[in-house]
Amino acid sequence: EELFYQFKGEMCVKIMEQGKPKDVRIKEGEIFVLPSYIPHSPQRPPGTIGLVIERERLEKEMDGLRFYTNENNEEVLFERWFHCTDLGTQLKPVIDEFFASEAKKTGKPTDNSVQSAAFDIDTEIKVEDPQPLSQLLDKLDGDGKLALFDKGEFKVIAYGSVDTPNTTRDIETFLWQQEG
């Protein structure tokens, strides 16, 4: 899973939902949890600021980089799986390999351009839409605790207090990752 929070501007996370491409737009002030095993490609334009939290990968867990034959993502053109410890250094060689590949030149998969997936891609789940964090926080109850997301690996809980439901709060956003 990945947790996204958009501080400034808007971004798009291109995903595969139930086997079809979908753009998830995350607007300023919105929070979004992307479930596990969903192919995705975050697209953040210049001048935007966002936060993405991922849990630390176990040594046996793999991440993948996948390119499709067309914008409808009908067929995988090129795919590589690897244990990711540093996106900044590990993606570039895979991207370079793709751009130098026969598959990229011809637009058709080759015998060695697509590796077997390291896990089963989720083709059944319906991904929840991003939600304004401020609206979620308006639901805080008397004890000042609210589970925002708690269905999957991430347990996202808001703590705080609210004087009245219509109060405009000048608050600081604080996100804390307890483990992983």
Image: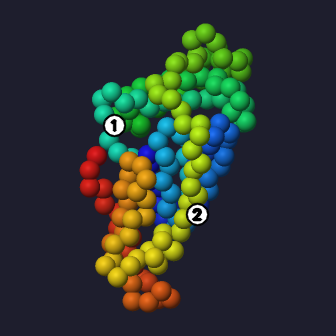
Q: Which mark is residue 57?
A: 1
- Left or right of 169? Residue 100 is right
Q: How many marks?
A: 2
Q: Residue 156 or 100: which is nearer the viewer?
A: 156
Disc 1 and disc 2 in contact, CB within 8 angstroms: no
Residue most extreme to the top: 111
> Visible in this render: residue 93?
no
Residue, x 30% and y 29% (percent of image)?
59
Crowding at dot 1, Cα within 10 Å, few <14 / some 14-19 / many 20+, comes out as: few
Q: Position of residue 135 (x, y in %)?
A: 51, 74
Where is residue 79, by image quadrant? top right
- Where 10 falls versus 78 (above or below)? below
Q: Secondary structure at mark 2?
A: loop
Residue, x 57% and y 18% (percent of image)?
114
Q: Position of residue 89 (x, y in %)?
A: 40, 33
The residue under label 2 is 27
